[in-house]
Image: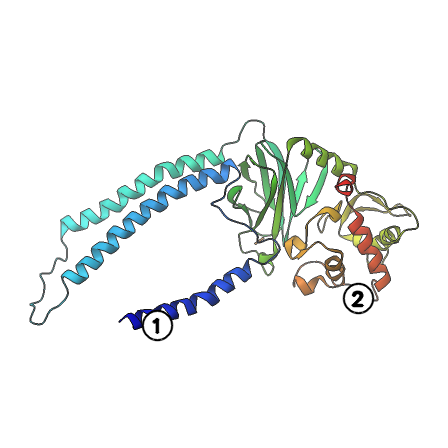
Amino acid sequence: MAGWIRCGRRVVLGALVPLLALALAGCGITGGEVQSANETFADNAESIWNLFVPIFWLSVVIFVLVQGALIWAVIKFRYRDGDPPPPQLHGNTKVEVAWTIAPAVILAIILVPTITTIADLASEPDEPYTVDVIGHQWWWEFEYEDEGFKTGNVLHVPADQPIHLRMTAADVIHSFYAPQLFGKQDTIPGRTTNIYFTPEEPGEYYGQCYEFCGLQHANMMFRIVVHEPGDFEAWVADQQDGAPDPEPDTLEARGKEVFFQPGAACHACHAIDGAVAEDGTEAVAEVGPNLTNIGERPILGAGALENTPENLHDWIRDPQESKPGNEMPSFSQDAISDEDLEALVAYLSSLQSERADAD
Ligand code: CUA
């Protein structure tokens, strides 16, 4: 018997270890770190957790009672040789009424805190700071309308300030969710949905799209950087200043030319606030993410890659390699030579606000 149990345990462990390895491998993606709803850093996520915990324990009690009764009945009333057929209870009104009313009462009890929490999360706080969130296949656009700038895939907000995310989508339905900060909310083309939350602690938080939205749904991640209040204002001022212009006759200056030249024509899809070509062309297109200060973003391709010069090089040469199906075309040697690509990567990596340089 003991040997059988040990063998059984080995079988269970043998099955669990590869499953666990598979699950952990899934956590290795760039944007996948700590997306845990049980470590909360904002009021919104906290009220959801505070609703979840009592319902979870209530469910545990019901599970144990129901399964306990089931096991007890199976053992106590098991068939023994010579037993007559048991009495049939089909259509017993008392039992039918009891097991209809009991779950209804339990659901009615759960309904009260659930509706209160939903109403609470949907109510607009006093004087929130508003950021527009637009879901795209497959990246996130963040617009600071009053401040007059946009950014991509990394949302910056101040701590201890109610935040209002005013959300929509450009193409299909997506869902915006950062478990440590707030509950998930769909972003829907032609409609506005809202998330209200007050981040409590400065730091970097992870989130991603939670509504299947096509081939690269899994690579539609984002970060939320929560700043100390004074630090946030400095960040806003940096974004309003636009991108720094490279020193003349440098690799970066050559890279800026490549950005506008016909082979690459990055400006046909991307904006860089303040970047103007020698012939006066401005980078103002809005097909892909705004690249102002892209050099200080931690991720590329909405979390498909970490933002390093090597990854940026590979990303521009062949974005279809790491994120198949995305809108950005690959660039052959004919379109951008190796030297030009090196210059372009140097230019884009240099697009950092002065504050980032000083860090
Ligand atoms: Cu966007 Cu899934």
Question: Helix, strand or loop at disc 2?
Answer: loop
Q: Can residue 263 be seen by looking at this rendering?
A: no
115 w.r.t. 96: above or below: above
Residue at screen point 23% across, 48% down: 100
Q: Is residue 166 left or right of residue 1?
A: right
Q: Earlier in the sequence, mark 1 or mark 2?
A: 1
Residue nearest the viewer, comparing 158 with 203? 203
Query: Looking at the rendering, in which quadrant would you find the C terminus?
Result: top right
358 w.r.t. 160: above or below: below
Residue at screen point 76% across, 56% down: 309
Q: Position of residue 19 (x, y in %)?
A: 47, 65
Question: Which residue position holds label 1?
Answer: 7
What's the amino acid at mark 1? Answer: Cys
Colour option used: rainbow
Question: Which residue position holds label 2?
Answer: 332
Quarter where residue 226 is shown: top right
Q: Position of residue 145 (x, y in %)?
A: 68, 36
Q: Is residue 129 left or right of residue 17?
A: right
- Residue, far top: 126
Q: Is residue 104 left or right of residue 308?
A: left
The residues tagged by marks 1 and 2 sit, at their Cα atoms, a distance apart of 57 Å
